[in-house]
Structure formats: C-alpha cells, structure tokens
Amino acid sequence: MMEDEDRALVRGCLRGDRKSFEEIVERYQKPVYNAAYRIVGRKEDAEDITQQVFINAFKNLRSFNEKRKFFSWLYRIAVNESLNKLKSTSSREILNDTEQGHDETPDILYDKKELQQTVRDALGHLSVEYRTVVVLRHFQDLSYEEISEILELPAKTVKSRLYEARQQLKDILILHRQI
C-alpha cells in the first residue's frame, strides 16, 4: 500500500537514509510540479515551487504526523508554496498545458490546442481559491476528502467551492463561445 511505503520512506529519511528521500522526490516530483503549474500557470515558477516544496518537506519531515497521508501533507506544502508565489507576484497568469499526442493529425492537434487554451483562459479568470479546488479535483484526480485535508477546509466547503468554480467556468466558456 502506497501510504505504508510513504511512511517507511519518511522513517528512512529521518534515520538519515538519503535514498529514501530520493525515492520520495522521484515518486512525487511530477504530481507536485503539475499541481503547482496548474495553479500558478508558469513553467519556471512551477519548477521553482517544486524545488522549494521538497526543500521544505525535507526540513520539516519531523513534523509529519504518520496518522495522516504523506502525499496530502506534501500537497499541502505545494499548494501553500503555489499560493505564496501568486501572492508575491500578484499575477493571474494564464495556465499553460502543452502535452500532445503523437498519432494526431495537425487538425486534431490544432483543435486540441485551441480547446486547451480556452480552458486555460477560463481557469485563469477564476480566483485562486476556486482555481485550486478545480486543479486538485479535475487535474490531480483527488477526492473531496483529500482536497479537504490538503486545504485544511471542511469537505462541504470544498464541494461548495468546486460547485461555484464550475458555475463560473461554465459562464466564462459560454461567454467565450459567443465572442
């Protein structure tokens, strides 16, 4: 089970085993980067945030409560770092996502890229609170309970924010289609 493996890796880190921390970084680097990237919208910022998340995690491993999920603890650090970055730059940058399939025709790639840009633009118009729950739920596939734990909010608040965010996205996308 992943949670048990994570706890064992944390215990290894606390005993001074460098390989354990390398395994944690390898396991979570991509999901942390993706969450940060979708929140802040800039590749360079997401890379900086990812690095800072693992530095902070390493420094604060002793504060990790083994009764909680490690990945939720780590994601909380990632969300906090992402929000701090947004506050420090006061930006509402457009999100960027450039993944492409290899077997797709130029027309399909163009349509996909246009749709991705439309969604990025719409997400960029959401407040940070709403954008964060959308990213964690729909791009990171986290449960309401996991998001609740990461954001330290009641699950009902997470559901409420997600509902409102979806309504706002719907309105933004409808408006975009009319233009």
Image (cartoon, rainbow, N blue to C red):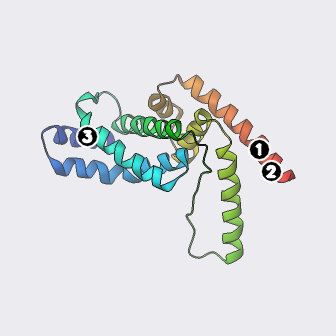
Q: Residue at x 19, y 37 (%)?
A: 11
Amino acid type at mark 2 = His
> Which element is circle 2 on?
helix
Q: Residues within 10 Å of mark 2 (few under 14, many from 20)?
A: few
Looking at the image, do the residues carrying marks 3 and 2 touch, with CB atoms under 8 Å apart?
no
> Which element is circle 3 on?
helix
- Could you give the CA–CA distance between mark 3 and mark 1, rounded to whole angstroms? 40 Å
The answer to whether residue 51 is left or right of residue 105 is: left
Q: Earlier in the sequence, mark 3 or mark 1?
A: 3
Looking at the image, do the residues carrying marks 1 and 2 touch, with CB atoms under 8 Å apart?
yes
Vertical position of residue 56 compared to residue 93: above or below: above
Q: Nearer the viewer, residue 137 or 42?
A: 42
| Residue carrying label 3 | 58
- Could you give the CA–CA distance between mark 1 and mark 2, rounded to whole angstroms? 6 Å
Vertical position of residue 109 compared to residue 25: above or below: below
Q: Earlier in the sequence, mark 3 or mark 2?
A: 3
Q: Nearer the viewer, residue 145 or 131?
A: 131
Q: Residue furthest front?
A: 89
| Residue carrying label 2 | 176
- Could you give the CA–CA distance between mark 3 and mark 2, rounded to whole angstroms? 44 Å
Vertical position of residue 146 compared to residue 37: above or below: above
| Residue carrying label 1 | 172
Vertical position of residue 52 compared to residue 69: above or below: below
